[in-house]
Image (cartoon, rainbow, N blue to C red):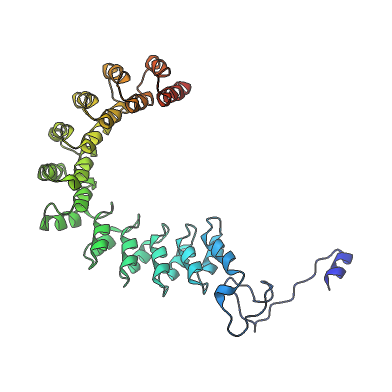
Amino acid sequence: MGRADSEKTGRRARRPAPDASRPQHPCGEVWGTACRVPVRPPGWSHNAHPLLATRRKKARQAATAPQMLLLLSQDPDREVRRRAAGNPRCPATAIGCLARDPDSQVRQAAASNRRCPAPVLRLLSTDPDPQVRYQTARHAHCPPAVLGTLSRDRSPEVRLAALTSRHCPWEVLYRLAARDWPGPPALQTAIASHPGCPPEILGKLATDLWDQPGDSWQALAAIASRTACPPGLLGALAGHPAALVRRCMAWRRRCPPEILERLCLDRDCSVRAAAAANSQLGPSMLQVLAHDRSPDVRRCLAGNPACPPGLLRQLAVDREKDVARAAARHLNTL
């Protein structure tokens, strides 16, 4: 039945049944029938096929169904498989198959997928390509046992990625740092930021890094941000010569009042701005910061939840437009 006959009868023409002898499309369609393209001639190039751009687009889109991604993971085009491996909706079954792909870029995309299961990450941690192992160590849900293995990797980039992960076991991190204490700056920051680091190690690290150059200030800033920081160390960190360290002290949720008042009068305007945004400020310091010469300090104060309505009305008529807008927005929420 042709098109004209179907228009007369009002019925849709039936599609001919697929021929099993014809080559199959990776997505389950038959070349020349469902795809409506000629059968691949001799010397046919897969990249020249008009559906290649469509398959690449489908493999990248977040709205693509998991069943379609499972089929696209078997596509002969490498770019289609790579995009399917990195798709956040790619099913775990397809990720497991793509983790054994002969192309290393496809395996890297599989290792960076947030849905990659733990057994597949364990498999990828033994991959011969260091970039695949690096992506495995950077995975947000990499098991601690796998990170412990990758911390002994022959590639220094892989070892550093494993040691700076928040899931790295504290014993592994401290054992490696103890060999060459305090270690490189990235390792120092990882130790200071690790949730399992005890207060005495934080104090020892801060003492050893106090006179170090600027690369070690990130570790001191991480120590200043930790709730486990020893109380006796807080006053010293508030007087550190690096503004980054003092700024992290001003951001602390449980910063002692006497230290917070000291930071409100800091010589660096970025430190005073961080203190102005702290919701633990007392009424006296709120008044002091409302007359600060830096507009950034007054703007941060206008967004502080502890700022009273009377002070907000005063800031709403500030000569700086950014400060006035921030105060007006805060007043509208009251």
Q: Say if residue 67 shows up in the picture.
A: no
**Which residue in the rendered view is the most extreme toward the right?**
8
Q: Which residue is drawn at 45% across and 61% down?
A: 86
Residue 174 sits above or below residue 237 on the image:
below
Image x and y of residue 239, in percent: 15, 32
- The one nearer the camera, 297 or 222, is 297
Residue 320 sits above or below residue 34 on the image:
above
Q: Say if residue 55 shows up in the picture.
A: yes
**Residue 282 position by quadrant:** top left
Residue 330 sits above or below residue 175 on the image:
above
**Which of the image's four quarters has the N terminus?**
bottom right
Image x and y of residue 190, in percent: 23, 50
Horizontal placement of 228 versus 128: left or right?
left
- The one nearer the camera, 105 or 22, is 105
Image x and y of residue 20, in percent: 65, 82
**Which of the image's four quarters has the C terminus?**
top left
Q: Which residue is drawn at 40% across and 23% down?
A: 320
**Residue 65 position by quadrant:** bottom right
Image x and y of residue 192, in percent: 20, 46
